[in-house]
Amino acid sequence: VQLQASGGGLVQAGGSVRLSCALSGRPFSNYAMGWFRQAPGEERELVAAINWNSETTFYTDSVKGRFNISRVDAKKMVYLQMNRVKPEDTAIYYCAAKDYRGSHYYTGFGDYDYWGQGTLVTVSS
C-alpha cells in the first residue's frame, strides 16, 4: 500500500486549503483513514479520521467546525478540507491508513498501518 499526499502550501489566516491523499496497491474500502499533523517541536497528533464507509468521523477539538474529512472510494482518495485556517494549523500533514472495516475510529499514531510522505501547510498571519 502506498499513500501520496498533496495540496499543501502557503495560505493566509482565515483562508481555505484542501489536502488530498491517494491510496494505491489495495482496495481502498479495506481501510480506515486518518489525517495527522506535526508542528516543529511537537508530537504528531491526529487531526481527523474516517472509517471505511464514512459512517464514523472524528475531529480533534481544535479543528471542529473548521475542517472536514471525506473519502471517495471510486477514486481511492481521502480529503481534508481546511477552512478558516489559523497560524497554529501550520504543520506537516500526513495521511494514514488502517486495515480495518468497522465503525470504530483510531486516534493513536501506532494504530495506523501505512503512512504518506506528508505535505506542508503554512498559515501566515
Image (cartoon, rainbow, N blue to C red):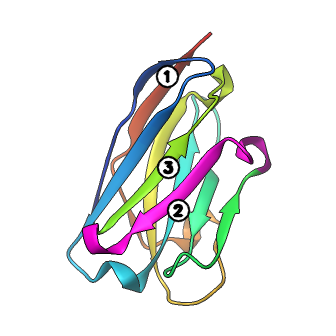
CB contact under 8 Å: marks 1 and 2: no
Q: Quadrant of residue 25?
A: bottom left
User: In the rendered structure, which amino acid carries the disc numbered 3?
Assistant: Leu
The percent position of residue 30, horizontal first and vertical second, equals: 39, 85
| Marks 1/3: CA–CA distance | 15 Å
Where in the figure is residue 89, as x and y percent of width and height? 62, 31
Please report the residue visible at 42 percent of the width from the left and 32 percent of the height from the top: 120
Against 21, residue 51 (above or below) is below
Q: Nearer the viewer, mark 1 or mark 3?
A: 3
Q: Is residue 69 magenta?
A: yes
In this picture, is 78 found above or below 105?
above
Which of the two discs, 3 and 2, sits closer to the camera?
Answer: 3
Residues drawn in magenta: 61-75
Q: In the rendered image, which residue does mark 3 sit on?
A: 80
Residue beneath label 1, please? Answer: 122
Q: Amino acid at mark 2?
A: Gly
Q: Which residue appears at 35% of the width and 37% of the height?
A: 7
Residue 15 picture location, percent across and down? 56, 23
- Answer with left or right where residue 17 lies relative to residue 60: left
Amino acid carrying label 1: it is Thr
Q: Position of residue 28 (x, y in %)?
A: 33, 78
Quadrant (top left/top right/bottom left/bottom right) for the C terminus: top right
Sequence order check: which comes first, mark 1 or mark 2? 2
Pick whichever, 27 or 111, lies toward us: 27
**C-alpha separation, residue under disc 3 versus residue under disc 2:** 9 Å
Within the magenta stretch, is there residue 32? Answer: no
- Disc 2 marks which residue? 34
